[in-house]
Image: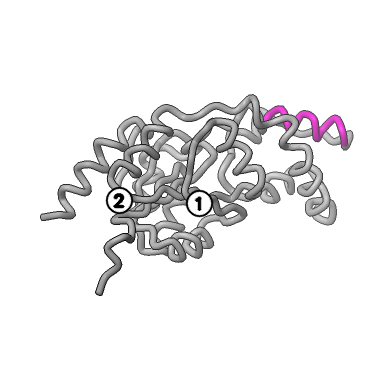
Amino acid sequence: MADMTAPALTVGFDLDMTLIDSRPGIHATYLALAERTGTYIDADLAVTRLGPPLEEELVHWFPAEQVAPIADLYRAMYPAHAITGTLAMPGAREAIAAVREAGGQAIVVTAKHEPNAKLHLEHLRIDADAVIGDLWAERKAEALRAHGAAVYVGDHVGDVRGARTAEALSVAVATGPCDADELRTAGADVVLADLSAFPAWLSAYREASRV
């Protein structure tokens, strides 16, 4: 017999540029890292490329053999520079609330270092049922499958790939570095301007699922 207490729906959300605008905090952290290491980093450019793992950005500024220890240093410095300057994206809290009101669970699956992802959500009072970090693109499917996510919401073509690998519906928001056309070309099932449109979409999706 099916477990009637199980949630009807699990929706996964990306973090950076989907639920939160972390550009100011990441920009500040890169500037602090540049000062600490004496290495030039174009922080303005770096924050236009959010989504992939930190290491993929650091290779533009540091020799390959330094990337791993520099990444550790960045992550250690991050809480002091990035948390308070970060804002919730429009509609973020309402999107999480819509999932809860539908009797479902909202999880966050992100490439960000998991402890730092949790700090952001705690600071902004965005209450997710689970937070899974350090996963990018197709590897996000590991967490999505483990939690039985039927939908994954993200702003990057890597998020689309993660959703499709997990055989989850890919809902993309055009609030990050990838525009709507890029997201559609990557295979997004739905493209929204931002999360403000998510509650209405979720209501329509659930209604269609009942038919």
Which callout, 1 or 2, points to the residue nearer the camera?
Answer: 1
Dividing the image into 4 quarters, which one contains the C terminus?
bottom left
For mark 1, give the secondary structure.
Answer: strand
For mark 2, give the secondary structure.
Answer: loop
* Side of 164 where 83 appears, left or right: right
Spatial CA distance of label 1 from label 2 is 24 Å
Residue at x 39% of width, y 50% of height: 105
Residue 192 place in picture, x, y as percent? 33, 37
* Side of 49 where 197 appears, left or right: left
Dividing the image into 4 quarters, which one contains the N terminus?
bottom left
Residue 93 place in picture, x, y as percent? 42, 33
Q: Nearer the viewer, residue 58 or 12?
A: 12
Tell me which amino acid carries mark 2: Asp
Q: Chief secondary structure of the magenta span?
A: helix
Q: Nearer the viewer, residue 159 or 49?
A: 159
Q: Quick one: label 1, few (<14), some, or many (20+) residues within 10 Å?
A: some
Q: How many marks?
A: 2
Tell me which amino acid carries mark 1: Ala
Q: Nearer the viewer, residue 150 or 164?
A: 150
Residue at x 38% of width, y 58% of height: 149
Residue 88 place in picture, x, y as percent? 50, 29
Relative to 14, does residue 4 appear above or below in the rendering?
Answer: below
Q: Quick one: label 2, few (<14), some, or many (20+) residues within 10 Å?
A: some
Q: Is residue 158 magenta?
A: no
On the image, numbered disc 1 is attached to which residue?
130
Residue at x 30% of width, y 48% of height: 103
Mark seen at residue 189: 2
Residue bounds of the magenta highlight: 27-36
